[in-house]
Image (cartoon, helix red, strand yellow):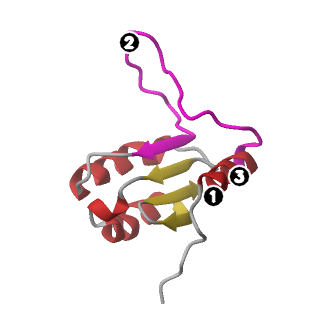
Amino acid sequence: MARHAPRFTEQRIREALQQTHGRQFAAAHILGCNRKTIEREYALVHFDGPHDLASLAAEVAFFAPRTPPGGAWVFDDIQSYDHGTLHEHHILPAGMEMVASEGRKALYRRAG
């Protein structure tokens, strides 16, 4: 039997992140001016395109080892691709657990 996650709201995301990390989060993090860097850790990842399973699976594989305990992933436009397959075969095996899902969005966090 499928487990239904709590309702997904912007407030719920803020509360989950604050509870996990003990502080407020801004909507964006600027990595640098006129240069690209690859961070070693990502406490918050927002997946918003491309909207195909193969690309998202590759992104999950990239961010999985770089997400610390308590880190959060937000997936947008989950109706645009097979999110169920991504959830079962890529997100859960990456050590993430669903916190909330509603409409076009799903929120996951790494236990710890």
Residue 21 belongs to the span the image colors magenta: yes
**Residue at which label 1 appears:** 111
Q: CA distance from mark 3 to mark 1?
A: 16 Å
Amino acid type of the residue that numbered disc 1 sits on in the rendered structure: Ala
- Magenta stretch: give its range: 20-47
- Residue visible at 30% across and 54% down? 57
Q: Main secondary structure of the magenta part?
A: loop
Q: Marks 1 and 2: CB-CB under 8 Å?
A: no
What residue is rendered at 42% in x and 26% in y? Answer: 38
Examine the rendered structure and indicate whether residue 17 appears above or below residue 26: below
Residue holding disc 3 = 15
Q: Marks 2/3: CA distance?
A: 32 Å
Q: Is residue 74 magenta?
A: no
Is label 1 or label 2 in front? 2
Circle nearer the N terminus (2, 3): 3
Judged left or right of residue 11, residue 54 is left
Query: For mark 2, what is the residue?
Result: 35
* Place of residue 50 in the rendered image (x, y in percent of width and height, measured from the top left): 26, 46
Q: How far apart are labels 1 and 2 at the CA level? A: 32 Å
Q: Residues within 10 Å of mark 1 (few under 14, many from 20)?
A: few
Residue 82 x %, y %? 28, 67
Which residue type carries mark 2? Arg
Bin the neighbour count of mark 3 within 10 Å (Cα to Cα): few under 14, some 14-19, many 20 and up: some
